[in-house]
Image (cartoon, rainbow, N blue to C red):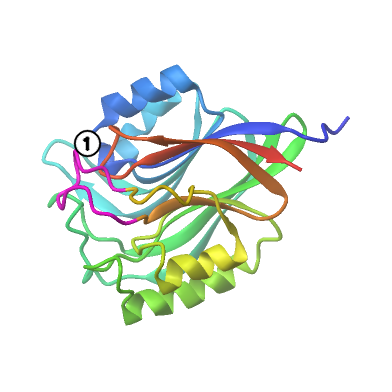
């Protein structure tokens, strides 16, 4: 029988290409979220998450070579639930000309950007989950023409989703056109009192007063108990309870 109000503990985080892998693993051991929506996941780190009991779905954005290992980095959906309908929706193919300084020199710039989606079975109830790592620009408060073009294409992708729980690193700030445009179509669940999702302990520019990360939902989902998590990456994470209503 279909459970009318199934709940799912969801964690969203930019994994910072594995620089704080031990801390992330310890957090997941302690909190045991049912699903993790992540950016900058490296293929070399996937076995560590699988050992925690997660099924890992991965969508590459580019490659890395740290002198010891090589592989790909990109988007991940980690789940303790059954997953189906795993899909990629590419909205930009890059040319390597837009490096993100927060990514180490051994990490190649994004070669493609996409919405990565899957359906999770939560007590017999489908949850449509997705994540994206949006086009980078030097200053997050001023969207570039490239970002605006990416936003238009990403919007057409999101038109394909009748419902969604979307975890993002948007690389553009709340209060600016792209972030607020997304918030006009989906609910922004980062509380208004939160003024930064940049973790100054790790970020190369310190504690910037901007919100560039978030979890957005369509009306079919209720997000509660939002916890802002620091100390795991150069970006802050979000641990939330999501109810299918």
The answer to whether 73 appears left or right of 56 in the picture is left
Examine the rendered structure and indicate whether residue 72 appears above or below residue 148.
above
Residue at 23% in and 53% down = 208
Q: Which residue is mark 1?
A: 19
Q: How far across and how far down the image is residue 131, in percent?
A: 49, 51
The prevailing secondary structure element of the residues shown in magenta is loop
Magenta residues, start to end: 198-210
85, 190: nearer the viewer: 190
- Is residue 15 in view from this perspective? yes
- Circle 1 packing at 10 Å, graded few (<14), some (14-19), many (20+), is some
Residue at 32% in and 56% down = 210
- Is residue 167 in view from this perspective? no
Q: How far across and how far down the image is residue 64, in percent?
A: 22, 48
Q: How far across and how far down the image is residue 209, in percent?
A: 28, 54
Quadrant location of the N terminus?
top right
For residue 58, what is the image quadrant? top left
199, 146: nearer the viewer: 199
Examine the rendered structure and indicate whether residue 115 appears above or below residue 223.
below
Examine the rendered structure and indicate whether residue 159 appears above or below residue 49.
below
The answer to whether 86 appears left or right of 112 in the picture is right
**The residue tagged with tag 1: helix, strand or loop?**
loop
Residue at 77% in and 33% down = 124
Quadrant location of the C terminus?
top right
The answer to whether 132 appears left or right of 34 in the picture is left
Q: Furthest residue to the top? A: 30
Q: Furthest residue to the right? A: 1
């Amino acid at each position: 029988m279909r459970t009318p109000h199934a709940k799912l503990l969801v964690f969203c985080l930019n994994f910072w290409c594995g620089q704080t892998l031990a801390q992330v693993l310890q957090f997941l051991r302690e909190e045991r979220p049912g699903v993790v929506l992540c950016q900058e996941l490296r293929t070399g780190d996937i076995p560590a998450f699988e050992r925690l009991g997660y099924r890992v779905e991965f969508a590459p954005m580019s490659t890395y070579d740290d002198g010891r290992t090589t592989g790909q980095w990109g988007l991940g959906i980690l789940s303790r639930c059954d997953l189906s309908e795993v899909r990629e929706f590419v909205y930009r193919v890059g040319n390597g000309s837009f490096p993100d300084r927060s990514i180490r020199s051994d990490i190649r710039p994004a070669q493609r950007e996409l919405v990565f989606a899957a359906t999770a079975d939560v007590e017999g109830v489908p949850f449509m989950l997705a994540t994206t790592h949006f086009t980078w620009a030097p200053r997050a408060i001023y969207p570039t023409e490239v970002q605006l073009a990416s936003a238009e294409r990403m919007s057409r992708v999101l038109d394909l989703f009748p419902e969604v729980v979307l975890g993002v690193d948007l690389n553009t700030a709340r209060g600016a056109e792209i972030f607020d445009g997304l918030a006009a179509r989906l609910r922004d669940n980062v509380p208004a009192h939160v003024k930064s999702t940049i973790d100054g302990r790790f970020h190369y520019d310190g504690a910037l007063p901007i919100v560039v990360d978030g979890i957005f939902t369509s009306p079919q989902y209720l997000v509660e108990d939002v916890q802002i998590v620091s100390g795991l990456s150069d970006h802050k994470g979000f641990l939330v309870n999501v109810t299918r209503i």
